[in-house]
Amino acid sequence: MNNWYARLTDYFPEREMKSRKHFEILFNEKQGIYRLEESQDFVLVYFEMSDFIFIDYILVARNNRRNGRGSRILDQLKQKGKAIILEVEPVTLIDPDSEKRIQFYEKNGFLKMNSIRYERIHLVTNELNKMDIFCWSPVTKTEKWVYDKMHAIYEGVHAYKARELYGRDPQPVSDVLRKKELTYSKA
């Protein structure tokens, strides 16, 4: 196949993409941890640590959506018995697929981490990129646990070698990730 990068850039907005060189450095320097799986049906890029998996990109070919292919990919990852974390663009009227994506993840058992705010400025486009964080786990994980893992994901994947690749420092993780206190109304 080997056209994974073109497929990703055709689908994902530029403000969500890494440069091809960024991917290549991650694949080379984090070999066995940062992985690519590709077929004519899908592209999957993920970061796997001992206790969690971060799905960086998942793309199911348009003609294979709604036939269970995406759920089967997630089920294969779930078989590893680790928590799975991913970022999802919030529902927006600009992208009619945004609501379908969230429904897909929720149907597959992912929960939105309501206390985590994730906003970063893209290193090339300078666009603000706001994402919701979702997690699936075979055992209950707190939002604090997911928040801590997102710190490692940001520094180990998104901001990895940013100065070398993009000519500027990435935002500090404290500017990108914030944990807000949830308030509950009394019934």
Image: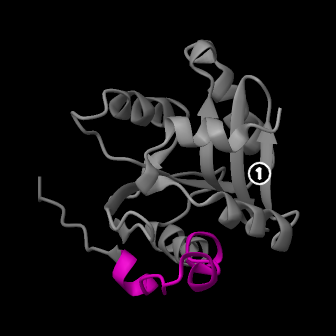
**Residue 147: x, y in percent?**
48, 72
Question: Is 4 included in the stretch rendered in magenta?
Answer: no
Left of 53 or right of it: where is 65? left
Residue under pointer 1: 81
- Which secondary structure, mark 1? loop
Q: Is residue 46 left or right of residue 90?
A: right
Q: Nearer the viewer, residue 43 or 145?
A: 43
Between 156 and 1, the one lying in front of the other is: 1
The kind of residue tagged 1 is Gly
Q: Is residue 119 above or below residue 165?
A: above
Relative placement, left or right, of 42 versus 185 is right
**80 displayed left or right of 82:** right
Q: Tell me where the magenta segment starts and ends, as one range.
A: 155-177
Q: Can the viewer see residue 49?
A: no
Residue 125 in the image: above or below residue 81 = below
* Quadrant of res 62: top right
Question: Looking at the image, can residue 122 be seen?
Answer: yes
**Measuring 60% from the left and 60% from the top, which residue is drawn there?**
19
